[in-house]
Each structure stands twice: as structure tokens, then as C-alpha cells.
Image (cartoon, rainbow, N blue to C red):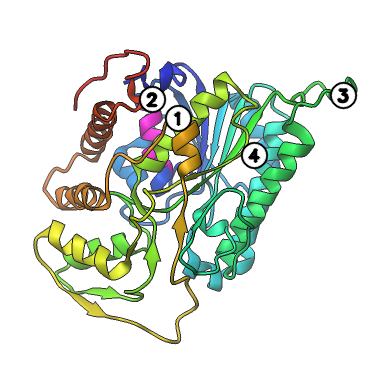
């Protein structure tokens, strides 16, 4: 497993902010499987249960609990751990919560991103930095159109607006501090502790609606479905007609890892924004997703819970990932039916006595990598001829 993605991560020190969250936990586990020395910076996990503790990640990595809103702390951790690759996932990730906590959402998602990039700027060990944002960073006109990386940024709700702002912070730092220029004066007279212009490859990544086992967040469709099914309650469906680009958690994570491996080998070529979503035309509405969840679970029912007084949530959002498919040789491995099947397998298994989340989740990672190898994706070993352990 350590040799996929060209073996880039084996032996590297990799910082993951937000490692106690859903995606951060999956990414941290995969990185340990790839042979990386993983450092984490995040707040303590909110939910009980939570994937971070279920996986036992506190025993597998250097886990630091702290707040990215604390610039001095962020700088201290980077100075101490000297990461070579950074994945920034720490965020307030929920649209509905952003209406209740707009200031906190902007503080974490915008200022937290600036703090992380300022710390990277002053840490000479870093060669690759990836800021994970969202497909909701686009100015969504809610029309039948899949957004590309060149489309305008925006956001009606505080969460989406904060992520658009985070993208602008990334763009500003890239142009101001991390882009190599031909001027002989660039980089002269800088403090010894700061990176040189062009020495850091800085990208941003925008994924769709990510699903997978171990997500226990409130006000997210799949966790809400799982909790209802486990409690033998009907699934309350708030926005049955809302269309989203749903995808299995390992699809965007494979994109992040593939991109970072290429950033490592050719820093300036890949230092830009990237979409990682499902195939065009595969976005589905919430009602259809719930039906697939019920089918995968094998029992249960749903009920209408539409509330006209609820805060606005976009009714239609699609993502165009053709750039990543063409330039990174990346593509989704699972379609939506397979994604939901794997996800509900995880939740069902979690109800069994003695459930071993670590080995079950690791098995899903290895099964996914084997499927990617079968699909002849170069990151999985096809290009280089590396053998891949079967699950």
C-alpha cells in the first residue's frame, strides 16, 4: 500500500488539520497506510460516537488538539513538527450551523485558512500545501450547469461565502508568496525562517457532497438516515428535490492524494484550484438518495419533513471535474449506488458486537484501491507497475 501514489508519502511528515473530523479521519488513516508520519491539528471531536476515536487514530499519529484561529499555536506546531506536506481540512463544515454561528464560521474558515498559510510561509520544510474547500464556494445560480474552476466564486449562506473567501485567501497567498517569478529581486532579503518564492506548491480542492461510514455529524443527510434506521424511525426528508453531486469519501481523497503526489514532483504545474466530483450527469436529488439508502439497508421508510421556514439551502448544485480527469488521470471509482452500498455496510457493521472500526475501514480503503487498480488508474500502481495488496 505504501507504494501507491508513486510512493510519495512513504516516510514523509504530513500535517492534516481537521484530523478529528469525518474526512480528516479517513485521510489520516489512509496516510498512515501509505507510510506517512502523520501529524494532526484539530479541535477535539464533537460527536459521540466519532470516527477519530473509533479508529484509534490518537494511537497511530501525532495528534495535537488546538484551534486554527490561534495563529501562534499554528505556527508553533509547524515549527515543531516540520511537515513536508500539508492538507488543511479544519473548518466549520455545516451550512445550517453557519446561520446560527456566522461569525464563528467566518473566523474558522477564512481566518483559520490565513493562519495556516502564514505558518506555511514561515516553515521552510513545507513543499506541498493543499487547502480543502467545497463545491459550495461557487456563485450558485441554481441552473442546469456544472461549475468549473474558472467560474465566479460566491455564496448566499455564511458557510458558502466563507469558503469562497477562503479560496480568495489561497489565491492571494499563492500570488504574493508562493509563485515563482523571473525577477532576480524576488526572495532577496527575506527572513531565514520564511519559505522562498516558488518553493511551496499551493492548491485548493473543491469536492462535492461526500458520504461514507463514520460520519456522525448533525444535519447531514447520510448520518441522519443512519441514525433513524438504527433507531427504527422513519427518515425525515427536509429537501427531497435538492440535487447534489454525491460521492464516496475515498473518491475525493484519492484526488487530493493524487494531486499532492504530482505537486511534490512538479510544484508549479499543479499549483491551482481543482474540482473532484462525480461524473457529469450523475448528480441525484435527496429523495432518490434516500430511496437508495433504504434499498441498501434492506428495511425502513421515509417521511416528508419539508419546512418552508427553514434557512435557504441551494436546490441545485453540480460540479465539473473534467480538468482533474484530463490532467491528473483521476476519476471516481464508485458510482452512487456503490457509494451508498459501501456506506451503509459500514453503519450496519458498526452495530455488531465487537465492531472493529479500524480494520473494517482499512479494508474499505484497500478494496477501493484494488478497484482503482482494476480501473487502470495510474495512482493505484498501473502506471508504475507497483503491486497492490488485495483487501
Contact (CB < 8 A) between labels 1 and 2? yes
Q: Secondary structure at mark 2?
A: helix
Q: Residue at x 15, y 52 (%)?
A: 348
The answer to whether residue 62 of the structure is visible from this angle is no
Contact (CB < 8 A) between labels 3 and 4? no
Quadrant of the image for the C terminus? Answer: top left
Q: Secondary structure at mark 1?
A: helix
Q: Between 145 and 304, which is closer to the camera in this rendering? A: 145
* 283 sits to left or right of 105: left
The answer to whether residue 40 of the structure is visible from this angle is yes
Residue corresponding to mark 3: 183
The Cα atoms of the two marked residues, 3 and 2, are separated by: 36 Å
Q: Quadrant of residue 291?
A: bottom left
The Cα atoms of the two marked residues, 4 and 1, are separated by: 26 Å
Q: Residue at x 46, y 35 (%)?
A: 326
Residue corresponding to mark 4: 74
Label 4 environment density (alpha carbons within 10 Å; few <14, some 14–19, many ≥20):
many
Q: Earlier in the sequence, mark 3 or mark 2?
A: 3
Q: Quadrant of residue 231?
A: bottom left
Q: Position of residue 67 (x, y in %)?
A: 59, 48
Q: Between 190 and 170, which is closer to the camera in this rendering? A: 170
Q: Secondary structure at mark 3?
A: loop
Considering the whole magenta stretch, tell me its main secondary structure: helix
Q: Between tags 3 and 4, which lies in front?
A: 3
Name the mark on residue 258.
1
Q: Position of residue 190 (x, y in %)?
A: 86, 25
Q: Which region of the structure is painted magenta? A: 24-32
The Cα atoms of the two marked residues, 3 and 1, are separated by: 31 Å
Count of numbered labels shown in the rendering: 4
* 332 sits to left or right of 191: left
Amino acid at each position: 500500500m505504501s507504494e501507491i501514489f508513486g510512493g510519495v508519502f512513504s516516510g514523509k511528515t504530513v500535517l492534516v488539520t481537521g484530523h478529528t473530523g469525518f474526512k480528516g479521519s479517513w485521510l489520516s488513516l489512509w496516510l498512515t497506510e501509505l507510510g506517512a508520519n502523520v501529524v494532526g491539528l484539530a479541535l477535539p471531536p464533537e460527536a459521540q460516537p466519532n470516527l477519530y476515536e473509533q479508529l484509534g487514530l490518537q494511537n497511530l499519529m501525532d495528534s495535537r488538539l488546538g484551534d486554527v484561529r490561534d495563529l501562534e499555536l499554528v505556527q508553533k506546531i509547524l515549527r515543531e513538527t516540520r511537515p513536508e506536506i500539508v492538507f488543511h481540512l479544519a473548518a466549520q463544515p455545516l451550512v445550517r450551523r453557519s446561520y446560527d454561528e456566522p461569525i464563528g464560521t467566518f473566523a474558522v474558515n477564512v481566518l483559520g485558512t490565513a493562519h495556516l498559510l502564514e505558518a506555511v510561509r514561515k516553515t521552510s520544510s513545507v513543499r506541498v500545501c493543499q487547502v480543502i474547500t467545497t463545491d459550495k464556494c461557487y456563485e450558485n445560480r441554481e441552473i442546469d450547469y456544472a461549475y468549473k474552476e474558472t467560474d465566479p466564486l460566491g455564496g448566499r449562506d455564511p458557510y458558502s461565502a466563507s469558503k469562497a473567501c477562503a479560496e480568495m485567501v489561497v489565491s492571494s497567498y499563492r500570488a504574493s508568496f508562493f509563485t515563482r517569478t523571473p525577477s532576480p529581486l524576488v526572495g532577496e532579503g527575506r527572513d531565514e525562517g520564511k519559505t522562498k518564492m516558488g518553493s511551496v506548491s499551493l492548491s485548493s480542492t473543491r469536492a462535492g457532497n461526500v458520504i461514507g461510514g463514520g460520519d456522525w455529524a448533525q444535519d447531514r443527510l447520510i448520518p441522519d438516515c443512519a441514525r433513524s434506521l438504527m433507531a427504527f424511525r422513519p427518515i425525515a426528508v427536509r429537501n427531497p428535490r435538492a440535487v447534489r453531486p454525491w460521492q464516496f469519501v475515498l473518491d475525493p481523497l484519492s484526488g487530493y492524494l493524487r494531486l499532492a503526489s504530482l505537486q511534490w514532483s512538479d510544484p508549479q504545474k499543479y499549483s491551482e484550484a481543482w474540482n473532484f466530483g462525480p461524473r457529469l450527469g450523475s448528480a441525484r436529488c435527496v429523495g432518490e438518495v434516500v430511496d437508495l439508502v433504504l434499498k441498501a439497508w434492506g428495511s425502513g421508510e421515509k417521511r416528508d419533513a419539508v419546512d418552508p421556514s427553514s434557512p435557504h439551502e441551494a436546490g441545485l448544485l453540480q460540479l465539473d471535474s473534467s480538468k482533474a480527469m484530463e490532467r491528473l488521470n483521476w476519476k471516481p471509482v464508485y458510482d452512487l449506488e456503490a457509494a451508498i452500498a459501501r456506506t451503509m455496510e459500514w453503519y450496519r457493521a458498526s452495530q455488531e458486537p465487537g465492531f472493529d472500526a479500524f480494520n473494517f475501514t482499512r479494508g474499505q480503503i484497500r478494496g477501493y484501491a484494488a478497484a482503482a487498480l482494476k480501473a487502470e488508474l495510474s495512482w493505484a500502481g498501473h502506471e508504475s507497475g507497483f503491486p497492490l495488496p488485495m483487501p
